Image (cartoon, helix red, strand yellow):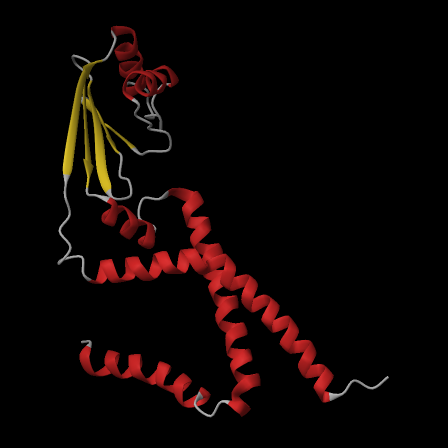
Amino acid sequence: MTITAQQKRSFWLRHLHNWHWISSALCLIAMLLFAITGFTLNHAVDIEAKVTRSQQQAQLPPALLQKLNAAQQQQKAPTSLPLEVKHWLEREHHIDVDGKAIEWSPEEIYIALPRPGGDAWLRFNLDNGEMEYEKTERGMVAYFNDLHKGRNTGKAWSWFIDIFAIACLIFCITGLFLLKMHAGNRSLTWPLLVMGLVFPLVLAIVFIH
């Protein structure tokens, strides 16, 4: 049985449309989010952020202070706090330090706790067991801007961005092939496509230095 050109065209159109609509459905909401945050990032100076800071101070129990001092005196400083100290932080102060880098010194322990849309830090005084914690929040716009950039968002969000990028590539590539297959009936297809390439290229060459 001979496959005609029309059957080949129908086969490719069907598969391209399937991949096109599936990829568009997968990345629609994320693409809207990235488009909106692209605008807010471009106008970050004009959008005023409402910064709020909260602070906590507490006294580390003597038994836990001994564990911190024992850890600090090891030949090679550990990469995480003793388990009992982490449990105390989570239970008493709702502070999660898992996976965060720790800076050890003879006098104190400092832990930076960056987060999307804000920042935080934690400090333990190894002499008297005093704990200080400060958290800064810059609002929802800053939060979503950091999601856009993948700033301090962790492994799960990083994987999501990669998967989203692949879905966008599939959406664009299948869209390009669909444009090619329908170009015969749409005379503006290739001029518009070339304009989409040339316009940002000219802007980059002429206005960006």
| Residue at far front of view | 185
Q: Residue drawn at (29%, 57%), measured in percent from left and top? A: 37
In this rendering, would 9 be left or right of 61? right
Q: Residue drawn at (21%, 43%), measured in percent from left and top? A: 139
The image quadrant where one finds the N terminus is bottom right
* Up-down relation of residue 170 to residue 112 (above or below): below
- Residue 180: where, in percent of width, then height? 54, 84
- Residue 170: where, in percent of width, then height? 52, 67
Q: Residue drawn at (54%, 91%), measured in percent from left and top? A: 184
Is any part of residue 32 visible from this angle?
A: yes
State how many labels appear: 0
**Front one among 155 and 176:** 176
- Residue 183: where, in percent of width, then height? 52, 88
- Residue 154: where, in percent of width, then height? 38, 42
| Residue at far top of view | 62
Q: Residue drawn at (35%, 58%), measured in percent from left and top? A: 34
**Front one among 52 and 66:** 52
Is any part of residue 105 visible from this angle?
A: no
The image quadrant where one finds the C terminus is bottom left
